Amino acid sequence: MSVSAVSSTRQPAANALSVDVEDYFQVRSFADRIALSSWDSYETRFGRNTRELLELFQRYNAKATFFVLGWNAQKDPDLVKEIARDGHEIASHGWSHTLVYQLTPSQFREEVVRTKSLLEDISGTPVLGFRAPSYSITTRSLWALEVLAEAGHLYDSSIYPIWRRVYGIASAERNPHLTKAGSKEIVEFPMSTARIGKWNVPFGSGAYLRLMPLYLTRVLISRHNRRGLPVNVSVHPWEIDPDQPRVRSLVERPNHYIGLGRTRAILEELLKAFRFLSVSRVLENMELIPELLRH
């Protein structure tokens, strides 16, 4: 992957905070049991949970990027309006929460364009960013970056510089950077990792946020910030909802349920300790989005 990494001497104003607006029944862990065609039969809880996050962020004067599923925006357009009205950024999480490499380029393009158009129509704001379901832009789906750039996205936040069975590029650049997207360029803001020995250790998002000791997360954020680098902190609305209905699956999904009762308290402690802005504002402070606009 050809990159132009940001200089670590630039001082970011804050860390990036984001919310992947999806519901408990839409997660990849339950895709073997719950088809998109059955989503309408489930009780939706993402609206209530997202509004609780909005209240929490307002209390600590934090701004965030909300990566919204197109299906959810269609289901609750008022939520999208409320997010934008509170001064947060609206970005795309795709339409159907299908892994990118399970789609053809034309199918992915259709989802991307459809979601971007709907979110912009509802919010009245431009949609600059995208995050793939389950971070599924990997070595086999790097073509997606070109599709995103052609559709008018200025940045992506999908690549995890680790290796997991479903996602990750272990050799990927770990800091925000410009990268080639066909004949264009796009900014990539990877999910955060700490370099420990030979390994990239994930922290600050999803199960990694819930399961890592809070003191260690704070140490790692502070270490990044001392180097002039922002951290990418991310949460899902269902992660502050320990009373969500339980989904029976053929395979146990402990990573979905472990630590749900701790998420809100962990997030609140981080909001007290650090300043957070939306992804696009952090990239703007790092002069990465303006640099892209000059191309």
Image (spheres, helix red, strand yellow):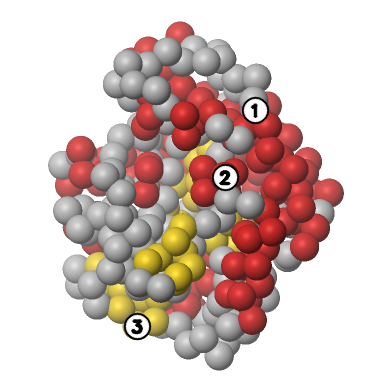
- Residue 102 placement, left or right of 76: left
Taking depth in this image into account, of 120 and 99 the one nearest to the observer is: 99
The crowding category of the residue bearing disc 2, from other C-alpha atoms within 10 Å (few below 14, some 14 to 19, many at least 20), is some
User: Are circles 1 and 3 on residues that touch, CB within 8 Å?
Assistant: no
Taking depth in this image into account, of 221 and 178 the one nearest to the observer is: 221
Question: Tag 1, which secondary structure?
Answer: loop
Q: Which residue is mark 3?
A: 4
Instruction: Give the foreground label among 2 and 3.
Output: 2
Residue type, numbered disc 2: Leu
**Which residue is at 59% across, 62% downward?**
16
**Which residue is at 65% across, 47% downward?**
84
**Which residue is at 47% across, 34% downward?**
255
Instruction: Give the foreground label among 1 and 3.
Output: 1
Q: Quadrant of residue 31?
A: top left
Residue type, numbered disc 3: Ser
| Inter-mark Cα distance, 1 to 3 | 39 Å
The crowding category of the residue bearing disc 3, from other C-alpha atoms within 10 Å (few below 14, some 14 to 19, many at least 20), is few
Q: Which residue is mark 2?
A: 211
Count of numbered circles on the image = 3
